[in-house]
Image (cartoon, rainbow, N blue to C red):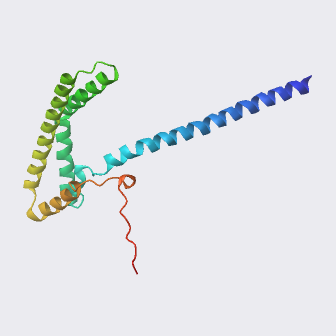
Amino acid sequence: MSANRSLIIALVASGALNLFLVGGIAGAAWMRQEARREAPIAAALAQRPPLWTAGRDLPPEHRRALRRSLREAALENRADAQAARAERRAVVDAMLHGRFDRAEAGRRMAAARTLESGVRAKVDGRLVGFAESLPPEERKVLAEGLRRVYAPRQKPREERPERPRRKNDG
């Protein structure tokens, strides 16, 4: 009788372990699929470097001053940026919950754009003020960094159309 009981306990433990392993493998496969689905979004967001990277070739004291100036601008504009995101979320929520009204959505999206434009203008003003404070040689270094940051975005590799290959008439 104790042999049967030990065997049953071993089988139950083995079954539980197998169920745990299968669940882990299935969960990992699902997570991998979700990561693939979200990869193009992450790639699109990562295409343009952050604005503060424009100063990476500046001397350390000016690099720190640029980051501090941009951080202060971000803090000053936090409320407007959050309000813009809230306007966009309200439109999405209305779509999800069947309360969509085109006029209301248009008004909210316009409000979000206006808020974002104001934030962008204030950050750009900070950047221009900072550039004015630099010596001309370092201003050129900052300009090269800004050229990198503002470069046209490239499509992620998997979205780029294939170029037709030329046949060699040889």
Q: Position of residue 164 (x, y in %)?
A: 37, 64
Farthest residue, direction front: 169
* Front residue of this view, candidates 2 and 150: 150
Measuring from the top left, give residue 90's x and y in whole percent: 26, 24
- Judge whether 87 appears above or below 33 on screen: above
Residue 11 relative to residue 149: left or right:
right
In this rendering, the answer to whether 136 lies above or below 35 is below
Which one is nearer the viewer's eye here, 61 or 57?
A: 57
Q: Quadrant of residue 76?
A: top left
In the picture provided, is 86 more to the left or to the right than 6? left
- Considering depth in this image, is 130 or 107 the residue closer to the camera? 107
**Residue 29, quarter of the rendered image:** top right
Q: Is 98 placed above or below 72 here?
A: above
The residue under the point 20% across, 54% down is: 150
For the C terminus, give its image quadrant. bottom left
Count of labels in the image = 0
Residue at 36% across / 52% down in the picture?
Answer: 159
Measured along the vertical axis of the image, is residue 113 above or below residue 105? below
Percent position of residue 168, x then y:
40, 76
Residue at 51% across / 39% down in the picture? 31
**Point 34% across, 19% down: residue:** 97
Residue 129 on image: x %, y %: 8, 49
Q: Quadrant of the N terminus?
A: top right
Front residue of this view, candidates 3 and 19: 19
Q: Furthest-right residue in view?
A: 1
Position of 117 with respect to 35 (left or right) is left
